[in-house]
Image: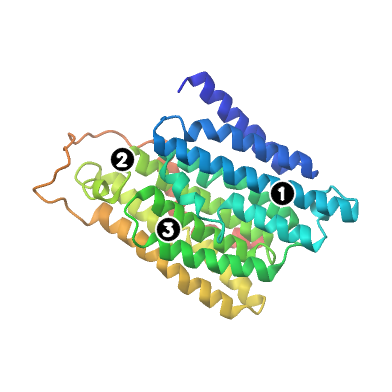
Amino acid sequence: MNPQAKLIFATSLLMGTTITISSNHWILAWTGLEINTLAILPLISKSHHPRAIEAATKYFLVQATASALVLFSSMTNAWHTGQWDITQLTHPTSCLILTSAIAMKLGLAPFHFWFPEVLQGSPLTTGLLLSTAMKFPPITLLYMTSQSLNPTLLTTMAILSTALGGWMGLNQTQTRKILAFSSISHLGWMAIIITYSPKLALLNFYLYTLMTAAAFLTLNSMKVLKLSTLMTSWSKTPTLSAMLLLTLLSLAGLPPLTGFLPKWLIIEELTKQEMASTATIISLLSLLSLFFYLRLAYCSTITLPPHTTNHMKRWHTNKPVNTSVAILTTLSIMLLPISPIILTIM
């Protein structure tokens, strides 16, 4: 793709996100979401492969539907209350429609079916944008309207997301699909806490972004798209494979890595809200995700390739690890000791 075109799309993404997260008026927020959608479409379909075109079409249709629902919910609220302010969403029907629209934009169950397919048809770098940057504007809208939303509905969707994200990721062999189901599962943790502690949901999103970016960039450096390729990676790039192992275990939420921090705080907050049973259910469901993270980790570090491998061997190179991968991996592993600072801020 032309570098000038890439610059235009990247600037549009940045502008769309900024407009949405800084707006108080529903029309401005909707405009930002639309700019974002239109800017990411060429990045999804840039390879011109039929799979990429299909992914871009699916993404466009889903996002257009969700944007129409956002507009419909804000208009309904304005009709009943005379308010276009995002924080003044008080009409129950509007709240219900908005929750569905944002769930569709994020890929939260039961509106998650498009996300693995779109991610599978996109390059790894575009997949990283779809999993992190494109979820930021909808999450901020949820954050701003969190006081008006229905906690029971969000809790049900959250448990469904964590369950489906874990179950459907179990038999996948494509790394992008595994990361897509991982994203759906993590969104469940954010959705369950957004009405009780919105700041905690945002913290979870930031740490999830860090860990997912580290995982995507490591896989991109290793040029790994499926598990069979990952099995031969240890002999070629042992350092990157070891970094991927730690990042995946952090995504799984194992102590003493960074990923344990949001899960620990969310379980603590749910217990304070007298929702210990819900906390127990969502914790047990996250064990499903742990299984496929461990399988990825096992493939990347413990499995040695057989002697009769069909893969063409590349020469072992002492190519230095990308600086951004190194920084993101360090943050993905070592942020647990800052938890007292976070607790004082919150």
Report, in whole angstroms, how far the alpha carbon at label 2 lies from the one at label 1. 39 Å
Say which of marks 2 and 1 sits in front: 1
Q: Nearer the viewer, residue 274 or 53?
A: 53
To which quarter of the image does residue 145 belong?
bottom right
Which residue is located at x 72 percent, y 57 percent? 97
Is disc 3 placed on a helix, strand or loop?
Answer: helix
Q: Which residue is mark 2?
A: 222
Q: Which residue is mark 3?
A: 250
Q: Position of residue 345 (x, y in %)?
A: 67, 58
Say which of marks 2 and 3 sits in front: 2
Which residue is located at x 61 percent, y 77 percent? 271
Is disc 1 placed on a helix, strand or loop?
Answer: helix
- Note whether 18 is above or below 170 in the view shown: above
Amino acid tagged 1 = Val
Q: Position of residue 169 (x, y in %)?
A: 40, 60
> Along the horizontal axis of the image, is 286 left or right of 322?
right
> Along the horizontal axis of the image, is 223 left or right of 162?
left
Say which of marks 3 and 1 sits in front: 1
> Along the horizontal axis of the image, is 61 left or right of 224?
right
Q: Nearer the viewer, residue 2 or 203?
A: 2
Report, in whole angstroms, how far the alpha carbon at label 3 lies from the one at label 1. 34 Å
Q: Which mark is residue 267?
A: none
